[in-house]
Image (spheres, helix red, strand yellow):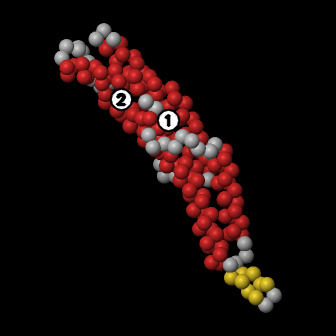
Amino acid sequence: MDVDYIVGLENSKTALGEVTQKALGPVKEAILPL
Amino acid sequence: MADKILDGVQTKKPSLQDFDEKITFLTSIKNQISEMKTLVDIGWLRVNATPLKQELNVTVTQWINTYTGFLLSNTTREIANIEKFIKDVSEGIKHIPTGSATQKDKDHLMNVMTHLRDVKMIKDRTMAEIEPMKQIILLLKKH
């Protein structure tokens, strides 16, 4: 296979972890008082 | 909410082991076909099996491609959905609302809250799906 899907999946896993951390961390904290 | 990740993805499917066994079986059939003699003498009759071997080879190859193609398209679709979800959420939470006085502020707040809800609902299930998807890719590389 030309595209390395394993690397793609690892990148997606990392990106999902980061976006989750941001969303449920600082973003959630910031909008709670609103 | 899981629809966002599973949009267009077939979830009811045979196990990966079933796919592996079937593709392995078909590959062995393909090898058997290629090892068959092309010219066979039956008494005074000489049979040229080349057209038959070619047809059988095409049919078996099509079936192998059907199985591997399904796994590949289903998995790449799910990967694409995950990537789109990450992009949508990243964009959606880029600007954090600072108030809720105007309708525009409220809409923005609701939008961000929707993304937070989606992330909360989808994250664990999606993380759990990554390892099985890796196994599918490894199986495809094997074949």
Q: Residue furthest left?
A: B102
Residue B65 placement (x, y as % from top left) = 56, 58
Rendered residue at 55%/48% (across/down): B71
Specify whether B86 is left or right of B71: left
Specify whether B2 is left or right of B19: left
Q: Report which quarter residue B35 is drawn in.
A: bottom right
Which one is in front, B83 or B59? B59
Specify whether B8 is left or right of B70: left
Rendered residue at 24%/19% (across/down): B106
Does dot 2 land on a helix, a strand or a loop?
helix
Mark 1 is on which residue type? Glu
Q: Is residue B10 above or below residue B37?
A: above
Q: Which residue is mark 2?
A: B89
Q: Residue furthest bottom?
A: B44
Is residue B82 in view? no
Specify whether B57 is left or right of B129: right
Q: Quadrant of the N terminus of chain B?
A: top left
Residue B138 placement (x, y as % from top left) = 59, 45
Q: Chain of mark 2?
A: B
- Are discs 1 and 2 both within one chain? no
Mark 2 is on which residue type? Val
Q: Chain of mark 1?
A: A
Label 2 Cα crowd, 10 Å radius (few <14 / some 14-19 / many 20+):
many
Does dot 1 land on a helix, a strand or a loop?
helix
What numbered label is drawn on residue A10? 1
Q: Residue furthest front?
A: B12
Q: Is residue B115 above or below residue B70?
A: above
